[in-house]
Amino acid sequence: MKKLLPVFLVLSLGAALHAQESRGSIAGRVTDPTGAVIPGAPVTVTNKATNTPRRMTTNATGYYEANLLEPSTYTVDVEAQGFKKFLRSGITLNVSARIEIDAKLEIGGVAETVEVTGEAPLLETSTASGGRVLDNRQILNLPFSDTNPFALTALAPGMQWTGQPEYRRPFDNGGTSSFNTSGGVGQNEYTIDGMTVTGTSRRVGFTPPSDSVGEFKLETSNFDASQGFTSGAAINVSSRSGTNAFHGALFDQHWQQRWNATPFFTREPYDAGVRTGTIDPNKTQKQATGRSNNYSLTASGPVFIPKVLNLKDKLFWTLTWNGIKQSKAETTSSTDVTVPSEAMKQGDFSYFLTIPNGANLYTIYDPRSATLQGSNVVRTPFPGNKGVPILNPVAPYYSKLYPTPNNIPGKVTPELYYNYFGSAMPKNEKFNAIVNRYDWIVSQNHRLNVRWQWNDRLADEYDFTYETARGLHSN
């Protein structure tokens, strides 16, 4: 252990240089009934979830300060000779909060206790930052469809969202990052436990599962020196830590496309075909089938094996696994594709001569017939735009990948743009994410926190070759 501690210390220092502190502090001043300060008074700040005490004594000015405290519920008790014991319980410390808890002792014996019950002050006077804090209970109970904790930034005053409503799932980094403050002038800073997860292009790099989040703090006006990495909002997530009690949760969020109304731009081409008599009314397009499941498993607690190992108050663990499986059809404009017709694949482009001004715009000339006549290059057109040779040797391979045009009325143009409507173009997703955290209380002054996270996404979407080469565009 003595050999490992310096290694952990070096790693921790290297990380802290680029970190924004997510832990909080409780501080205050101890005085007697007349308001005079009491130096040397023993103070104990205890995390009630882990039964972890932090002991200290007041300085010459009666001041105490407990730093680097994990978000949790705390008690503060103060003892001094000739005074009743002071106990303040029910103190909720949020992520990166700094709370002042003063203790005014009463004359009496130490065996007597004056207990004050109450939550932390609503107004945090030790900082000028403005924003919003959401705890785990709010994160789990507030209705947000994609269980993406960063989407809750919309709840803070001054935040605007410029993204698409469909794209804010945990793996939709662009949509998740489309929440801005001050008109979107600056870049947001995303952190988990104070460590940055800001990726490229002003986007979040990793979105933790909502069940793995202990608290979520959004600061929209940052005047604190620790927030000097961004000119936008600071989004600081505290991962959930284990406690002395075992906890577990399991959920599955199911979405069924058939329960929704058919999108207008999916229904309209078929309705237009019915109106013009080109589509049988009995075969009008129905809402495509599709479903999605978002499931999660969370477990936490102390390292404890009955009659074998008891590390309560010492070693804690948390495991969260989140999975998303989606199988549906694409509903955006990506379904409108331009592909060559069967005649074009055979070198027959005569159709283009039949459209207005087609002879001037779309006559195809044989490049091999080019001759120089004076200062002009003269070429011979292919008769009727037919017999155009396919010279590229890989063309037969690529031509097999293109689907056959279906020329849906209302979508295809006279030039045959958007002549293929992929009504069943897949939009399938397989996503898994894991967040693990371990907390070891080595001693009162030494703690070790380890967290690792992983995610993987397989996207099978925007694939217009789904009829000819299924899975070609998976990534």
Image (spheres, helix red, strand yellow):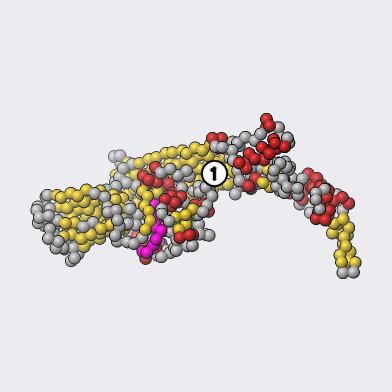
Q: Position of residue 238 (x, y in %)?
A: 38, 53
Q: Quadrant of residue 391?
A: bottom right
Image spot of residue 437 (x, y percent) = 39, 50
Q: Residue at coordinates 51% horizontally, 43% vertically from top-left?
A: 324
Quarter of the image with the N terminus is: bottom left
The image shows residue 365, relative to residue 320, as above or below, that is below
Q: Identify which residue is drawn at 29% across, 56% down.
A: 123
Q: Residue furthest bottom?
A: 375
Dividing the picture into quadrants, the one containing residue 29 is bottom left
Q: Which residue is mark 1?
A: 430
Q: Is residue 291 visible?
A: yes
Residue type indicated by callout 1:
Lys
Q: From the viewer's side, name the closer residue of 36 and 355.
A: 355
| 345 displayed left or right of 6 | right
Q: Main secondary structure of the magenta part?
A: strand
**Residue 473 in the image, given as x and y percentages of width and height:** 64, 48
What is the residue that sits farthest to the top in this orientation? 282
Q: Is residue 124 above or below residue 272?
A: below
The stretch drawn in magenta includes residue 195: no
Q: Residues within 10 Å of mark 1 (few under 14, many from 20)?
A: some
Residue 364 horizontal/vertical position (percent): 83, 55
> Farthest residue toward the front?
275
The quarter of the displayed image where residue 103 is located: bottom left
Which residue is rendered at x = 16% and y = 63% of the image? 37
- Between 294 and 153, which is closer to the camera in this rendering? 153
Looking at the image, which residue is at 39% across and 57% down? 219
Residue stretch in magenta = 216-224
